[in-house]
C-alpha cells in the first residue's frame, strides 16, 4: 500500500472516529436529556461518516486495487488523485467543523454569514473532489484478464 492510499485510508478512519463521537453525543443527548437532535449536528455526523469515512475509504481502496494505468494513459495523473485527497479532506473537515459550530452544542448558535458561506464552499469542495478523483480514475475502470476468462466461458 503506497503513501497516498494510506493517507486516504487513515484519514477515513479519523473521520469515522469524529462521526462516531458526534453520533454518541447525539444519542446521549436524546436519551439522557430528552433533547431533539440538532439538525446541524445530524448533518455533521452524516458528512463525517458518509463522505469522510465511506467515500474516502472507497477512494483509497480504489486507488490501491484498480488496475494500474496503462503507460500511454493521458488521463490518469497521480497529482489529480492527490489534489482530490486534499480537496475532500479540507472540504469535509470544514463542513463538519462548520456544522458543529452552527449547532447549539457550545451554546453559541453561530449564524454568521462567513460561517454559512464556508459550509457551502466546503460542500462544493467535497463534490469537486469526488469529480476530480473519478475523472482521473475513469480509465483504470477496465477489464484486466477477465475478458479472456469470460471468452472461455467462465462466469462471475
Image (cartoon, helix red, strand yellow):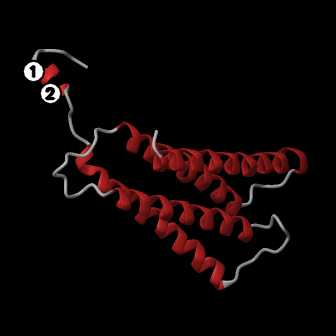
CA–CA distance in space, label 1 to label 2? 6 Å
Q: Quadrant of the C terminus?
A: top left
Q: Position of residue 142 (x, y in %)?
A: 22, 39
Q: Position of residue 95 (x, y in %)?
A: 60, 66
Q: Residue 144: name its quadrant.
A: top left
Residue toward you, 91 or 82: 82
Residue toward you, 75 or 39: 75
Residue at image location 67% in from the left, 49% down from the top: 19
Tag 2 residue: 147
Q: Which mark is residue 74?
A: none
Q: Position of residue 57 (x, y in %)?
A: 50, 44
Residue at image location 33% in from the left, 39% down from the top: 66
**Mark 2 packing: few (<14 Cα in 10 Å), some, or many (20+)?**
few
Tag 1 residue: 151
Q: Residue 63: name its quadrant.
A: top left
**Dot 1: element:** helix
| Vertical order, 97 against 138 (above or below) | below
Total residue callouts: 2
| Vertical order, 114 against 120 (above or below) | below
Amino acid at each position: 500500500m503506497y503513501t497516498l492510499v494510506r493517507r486516504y485510508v487513515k484519514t477515513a478512519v479519523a473521520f469515522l472516529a469524529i462521526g462516531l463521537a458526534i453520533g454518541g453525543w447525539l444519542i446521549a443527548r436524546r436519551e439522557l436529556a430528552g433533547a431533539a437532535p440538532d439538525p446541524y449536528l445530524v448533518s455533521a455526523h452524516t458528512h463525517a461518516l458518509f463522505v469522510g469515512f465511506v467515500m474516502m475509504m472507497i477512494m483509497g481502496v480504489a486507488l490501491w486495487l484498480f488496475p494500474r494505468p496503462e503507460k500511454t494513459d493521458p488521463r490518469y495523473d497521480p497529482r489529480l488523485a492527490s489534489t482530490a485527497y486534499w480537496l475532500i479532506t479540507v472540504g469535509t473537515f470544514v463542513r463538519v467543523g462548520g456544522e458543529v459550530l452552527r449547532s447549539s452544542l457550545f451554546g453559541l448558535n453561530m449564524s454568521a454569514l462567513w460561517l454559512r458561506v464556508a459550509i457551502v464552499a466546503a460542500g462544493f469542495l467535497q463534490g469537486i473532489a469526488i469529480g476530480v478523483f473519478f475523472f482521473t480514475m475513469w480509465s483504470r475502470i477496465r477489464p484486466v484478464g477477465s475478458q479472456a476468462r469470460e471468452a472461455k466461458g467462465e462466469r462471475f
